[in-house]
Image: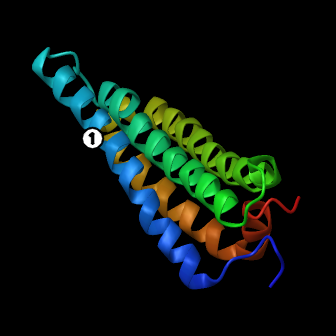
Amino acid sequence: MSKEEVSWEEQNYLRKLCVIPTLIAFCAILAYFVYLMHNNALKSAWDYLLHIGLLFAIIPSITFMLTFEVLYSRRVKMPLKHHLKRFTGRVLLLLAALLSFFVFLAIVYTVLSPLIGDRAIVLGSVIWGVGLFIIAVRFNEFLAKLSKGQW
């Protein structure tokens, strides 16, 4: 093991520590959701998707990844900038997946909304999720390299 690596058990311990700030971020989004529901600001499925779904997808994920990188860099006693490439790779994967989701969902909603209404969002979400799973299985090695910051 090099100086930059820690054991698998230590990485699991660091991941468990990352849950605390992620839960705080999750609770903040949940409070925002309750606020929007109380003020009747959510009118359609798009409102739920943009105001709640996007926040739930991005903020807890980035909070978890950033907390892990900070704890990891402190554990190996190296500056955070050494781990910035790996963090950037993971965030880029997350944002690419979300961008593809919204593009696909916009196309599906535009085509199917006149036929089946707001259920097009649910149908599009399921189709996109299955498609993303197939892509993740097919390109597992490439995504693992990108996630480690080896581009």
Q: In the displayed structure, would residue 151 be above or below residue 55? A: below
Q: Nearer the viewer, residue 92 or 86?
A: 86
Q: Position of residue 128 (x, y in %)?
A: 50, 54
Give 93 or 15, whichever is nearer the viewer: 15
Name, please, the residue furthest toward the left. Answer: 38
**Circle 1 sits in a helix, a strand or a loop, which is it?**
helix
The outermost residue toward the right is: 151
Q: Nearer the viewer, residue 133 or 127?
A: 133
Q: Is residue 80 above or below residue 118?
A: below
State the residue in front, 21 or 32.
Answer: 21
Mark 1 burial class by Cα count in 10 Å: few <14, some 14-19, many 20+: few
> Which x, y percent locates residue 136?
63, 68
Q: Amino acid at mark 1?
A: Cys
Location of the N terminus by quadrant is bottom right
Is 2 left, or right, of 72 in this rendering?
A: right
Residue 15 position within the rendered picture, expressed as x and y whole percent measured from the top left: 49, 67
- Tell me where residue 48 sits by quadrant: top left
Q: Which residue is mark 1?
A: 27
57 displayed left or right of 100: left
Q: Which residue: 82% across, 53% down? A: 82
- Residue at left 81%, top 59%? 149
Quarter in which the C terminus is drawn = bottom right
Q: Where is residue 90, by image quadrant?
A: bottom right
| Whether residue 50 is situated above or below residue 93 in the rendered picture | above
Residue visible at 17% across and 29% down?
A: 34
Left or right for 115, reference 70: left
Q: Tell me the residue at 69%/58% (across/down).
A: 73
